[in-house]
Image (cartoon, grey):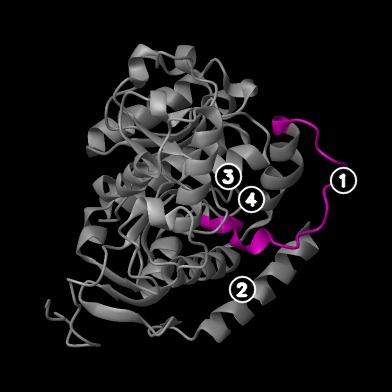
Amino acid sequence: MVDSPSGLGEAAPVGDTTPGLVCGHHHLYSALARGMPAPPRTPATFLEILEQIWWRLDTALDLEMVRWSAMLGALEALECGTTAIVDHHESPSAIEGSLEVISDACAEVGVHVRCCYGVTDRHGAEGARRGLDENERFLRSGGAGMVGIHAAFTCTDATLDAATGLARDLGVGVHVHVAEGTVDADAPARLGDLVDDSWLVAHGVHLSRPVPRPFERTTLAHCARSNMHNAVGYARPRSWTGPVVLGSDGIGADMLEEFRIAYVKAREDDVLSTPSEAWAWLAGGWALVPEALEDRVRWSSDEVDDPWHLAFTPGVRALDVWVDGEQVLAGGVATRVDPSEVRARAAEQALRLFERL
């Protein structure tokens, strides 16, 4: 038994539980997007999806929306046994202080988070500078995370140099979308010698195989469901030479579901793929947020540690969760926040967001 250092809740059992799960690539700001107004026209390409949906949404965000979107995303993660989130954020109209808002919201729910701001030149050199400043301010003030870059195709060479230089100065990695769609297929040439082993590469769908030399030992955040949803292709994580983790790309943080989808997609690609391989990708998230290894989750199934069983058993849910020794989910209900209030406040902010769209 592990005693609670805070004195709150029960002591966290070890023998009948698993560690907390990790979402290796999330966009917490997207939690308010459900039910958003349809785009002006139906997007037919990945770039049009970005331009007509996600880049319109992120520009409309203010800090109050960011806060309640993060609260809702963290709550839903906790309810799924996910105790750690590696987040990639963008809110071009509300950059300053946004990472602290996200970090505080997750802490209030009781979820670990690694934050970054996705630097981009989509809003000019001044917008890129403000994004760099937000990364630096947050990390120098003690925040946990990485330096974020949106993607090479939305950044100038000068911005890419500045972001990677900042990461080296701060001794952290870079969290960046790479070759998610064909629009970013030249990312290896653009990023070149800037890449090192500390990078977290999201998607990597259109990186060639064998993996290009600069990316050989970087960590891939594989987001199978999102890649299928955006019809961008398949990243083939089995052929990745560095570590692999699983992410949701903003579609919640039900990592058992992401594990099942990652397995089925891998199996479709190669009949020799096994659930154990997909489980190893899920377990890879613990290298990104080691604290989650000390968290404990009690599940509705006693077979949750068997990948073959779990791959074919839908509906497994978290019953009790302990984070840092404190029980933050009891009987499926969050203990630190009122779930009904979080959902109601998030719904209010979603309506504000939709009006702006």
Q: Is residue 178 magenta?
A: no
Q: Please say if 356 is above or below 244.
A: below
Rendering coords of residue 219 (x, y %): 34, 33
Q: Mark 1: few, some, or many residues within 10 Å (few <14, many ≥20)?
A: few
- Work out how far the residue at label 2 is from the one at label 4, CA to CA, in angstroms: 16 Å
Name which of mark 4 and mark 1 comes first in the sequence: 1
Q: Quadrant of the N terminus?
A: bottom left
Q: Earlier in the sequence, mark 4 or mark 3?
A: 4
Q: Is residue 305 left or right of residue 190?
A: left
Residue picked out by circle 4: 58
**Separation of residues labelled 2 and 3 (CA atoms):** 24 Å
- Secondary structure at badge 2 equals helix
Q: Which label's residue is closer to the chain start, 1 or 3? A: 1
Q: Secondary structure at mark 1?
A: loop
Query: Exactly how many numbered labels are in the figure?
Result: 4
Q: Which residue is mark 1?
A: 40
Image height of 148 relative to 3, above or below: above
Q: Amino acid at mark 2?
A: Ala
Amino acid type, callout 4: Asp
Along the line of sight, the residue nearer the viewer: 80 or 170: 80
Sequence order check: which comes first, mark 2 or mark 1? 1
